[in-house]
Amino acid sequence: MPIGRDGWFESAKPIKVEGGIRARTQRGSIGSTWWSRRFIDILERLCDKGRLSRGRAYARKGQVLSIDLSPGLVDASVQGSRPRPYKVTIRIEAYGEERWTAIEEAIAAQAVHRAKLLAGEMPAEIEEVFAALGVDLFPRDLDMDCSCPDWGFPCKHLSAVLYLLAESFDDDPFLVLAWRGRSRERLLGSLADEPGAADPLRVEDVPFADRLADFYAPAATAHRPERRPSAPAPDLLLRVFPPPGDLARTLTPAYLRLGDS
């Protein structure tokens, strides 16, 4: 059995858990949306791939007992090989009120971003909005800790929580923003009430009573006067409906007079 950093002997197999949080993705990559994959890409760049692989196995077995996300903090409990579950903590910077006000104003200034967020979608360009203000949407590094005795970093318990966190971002992209310090309700409430953000899909409703004065006015304007059909040429009827045979001499004067009228 391997020896941990505190000198304790550990069993190679974790204690089986009933009712733990189990990753939906049992094979291949975890994370299906651009925002969860972005988080996974950061993890795989920062962390040891072997330990991340063992963490995926833990996540798929359901060894994680609980995950609690709050501004700047994730607390989790993971069942390992010992009777007492390990405590996992992951910290990032949560932005303050002044910074979030600037972020919300920048989002509101982009009508498409604002409309997508109000519709429950996460626009891919939102990272650029954060970057333009000198802040990050996704963390560049993570302050992480686990109560287990494993030597490596991150341990498999931390890795399991990170993968399940990414999968939770699939279900609710606003958790990414909540981790940075802004809940879904606060963000959408601010965007919905933003005075300078005009809705690009809104059509001004003019009361019918205000339209009565010109409701029956003709469509012609001073710039496009109404065109009236001009009178046909005097001999047009003769060309279109020529009189039959001997009647031509008799009817021609009548046709000409009709065309002049």
Image (spheres, rainbow, N blue to C red):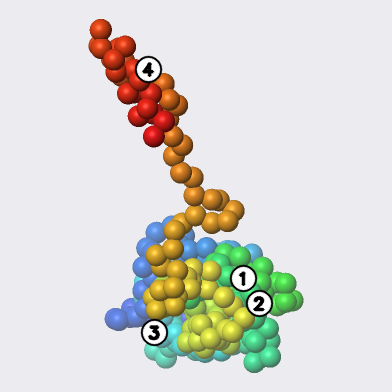
Q: In this view of the protein, can residue 205 be seen by the observer?
A: no
Q: Cα distance, mark 3 to mark 2?
A: 38 Å
Foreground: 236 or 159? Answer: 236
Gap in angstroms between the C-alphas marked 3 and 4: 96 Å
Helix, strand or loop under label 1 = loop
Mark nearer the viewer, 3 or 2:
2
Determine whether label 1 and label 2 are within 8 Å by CB.
yes
Instruction: Report which residue position mark 4 lands on.
Output: 239
Q: Which residue is mark 3?
A: 65
Q: Residue at x 37, y 78 (%)?
A: 21
Q: Is residue 176 found left or right of 60 in the rendered image?
A: right
Q: Reading the chain from its start, which is encountered first: label 4 or label 1?
A: 1
Query: What residue is disc 1 on?
Result: 110
Give coordinates of residue 136: x percent, y percent. Answer: 67, 75
Q: Position of residue 108 (x, y in %)?
A: 60, 77
Q: Please name the amino acid that badge 1 sits on.
A: Gln
Q: Position of residue 233 (x, y in %)?
A: 45, 26
**Is residue 217 visible in this depiction of the protein?**
yes
Q: Residue at x 44, y 63 (%)?
A: 217
Q: Nearer the viewer, residue 96 or 225?
A: 225
